Image: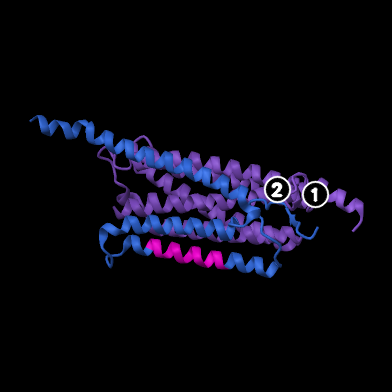
Chain colours: A blue, B purple
Amino acid sequence: MSDQTHVHTGHDLAPGEEEQHSVGERILGYVVGLALALLLTATSFFIAGTDLVWQPSIPVALIVLAIAQMGVHLVFFLHITTGPDNTNNVLALAFGLLVVFLVVGGTVWIMSHLNQNMPPMDQIMPMRR
Amino acid sequence: MSMTAAVGRTHADPHHIGLVVEHPGPASKRIVTAYGFWVFLLSDIVMFSCFFAAYAVLSGQTADGPRGSEIFEQRNVAIETVCLLLSSFTCGMASIAADVRNRFWFYLGMAVTCVLGLIFLVIEFREFADLVARGYGPSRSAFLSSFFSLVGCHGLHVSAGVLWLLTMMAQVFAKGFRADVLRRMMCFALFWHALDIIWVGVFSVVYLLGSAV
């Protein structure tokens, strides 16, 4: 009977809960998260007001920095990991993100097409003249 | 190897796949509560995404009123952002203190979180009052309507969070670190961190993109 493998299905982790760490390691995690978040925030504010970079790249850079900072918050403050004990939390998050992208992306996409097909009145009037 | 052990193994491995799974039973109440609250937070984020979508569509519809770059003050937004970030950190410290049942650090962390949250709210309220006093209230243009509803909704969440924070301090003071109080504390920490994530979206999309474009 030695071919049997014992699988220990331990409990899942609650969202926001860490695996067993000492207090010092947990505080260190928050410090690292805070430092990364402050760095990304400072970069965002710097990029928004600078003339050093190509101007059309600024909106893209701001969005990328925002997504990166949200990731930092999720990992270091909310302790969402890719571990097997976190599968439920990650799946719920993935579904939430899917809905968020459908709502925001779909709205922007549809409304920009509507604006092209049906320009507001102040843009139509010059055409008629 | 005894006979009973073999029978027991057969029971644990009914399909003879050579894999014995020891089921630990239903999840603990702490996990169920936090998971339910996590689902609520995600639905809250979906609600905020509707406000973000409305803002993205309406941000150009100023009706000859002020544009975003004319009314946003970067310095105030930077102070607000740092306040919320630091309060997220101190909230994490308070939840660690609650886990190790250290009252002093718990009260200190929660008090600092509360003060930082209140500073954020005061700055935001003064910004709103200033805009309304200049005639740029939410009824001035579609852009300002969507701006006030998005940022104001986040501000309402922070206000509710501050009230919840004070309730948690009172509960720990009156009841101590009981299991149910610790569960509520965990939900509060999740809520506060999620508000910070939403603020990252707000300051990037509304304030920084609004003044850059």
In this view of the protein, which residue sits in the foreground, B109 or B57?
Answer: B57
Residue, x 62% and y 69% (percent of image)? A28
The quarter of the rendered structure image containing the N terminus of chain B is bottom right
Tell me: residue A32, above or below residue B164. Answer: below
In this view of the protein, which residue sits in the foreground, B133 or A49?
Answer: A49
Q: Could you say which quadrant of the image residue A51 lies in?
A: bottom left
**Where are the magenta residues, as a range?**
A32-45
How far across and how far down the image is residue A26, in percent? 65, 65
Residue B1 circle label: none
Q: Residue furthest left?
A: A129
Q: Could you say which quadrant of the image residue B144 lies in?
A: top left
Residue, x 50% and y 63% (percent of image)? A37
Residue A35 magenta = yes
Q: Principal SS element in the magenta part?
A: helix
Residues tagged 1 and 2 counted as in contact (Cβ below 8 A): no
Instruction: Residue under label 1, please give it.
Output: B175
CA distance for labels 1 and 2: 22 Å
Tell me: residue B157, above or below residue B3. Answer: above
Residue kind at label 1, given as amino acid type: Lys
Indicate the secondary structure of the residue bearing disc 1.
helix
How far across and how far down the image is residue A123, in percent? 18, 35
Say which chain tag 1 marks.
B
Crowding at mark 2 (Cα within 10 Å: few <14, some 14-19, many 20+)? some
Instruction: Residue under label 2, please give it.
Output: B31
Indicate the secondary structure of the residue bearing disc 2.
helix
Residue kind at label 2, given as amino acid type: Ile
How far across and how far down the image is residue B125, in percent? 47, 47
Q: Quick check: B157 left or right of B212?
A: right
Question: Which of pointers 1 and 2 indicates the residue nearer the eye?
Answer: 2
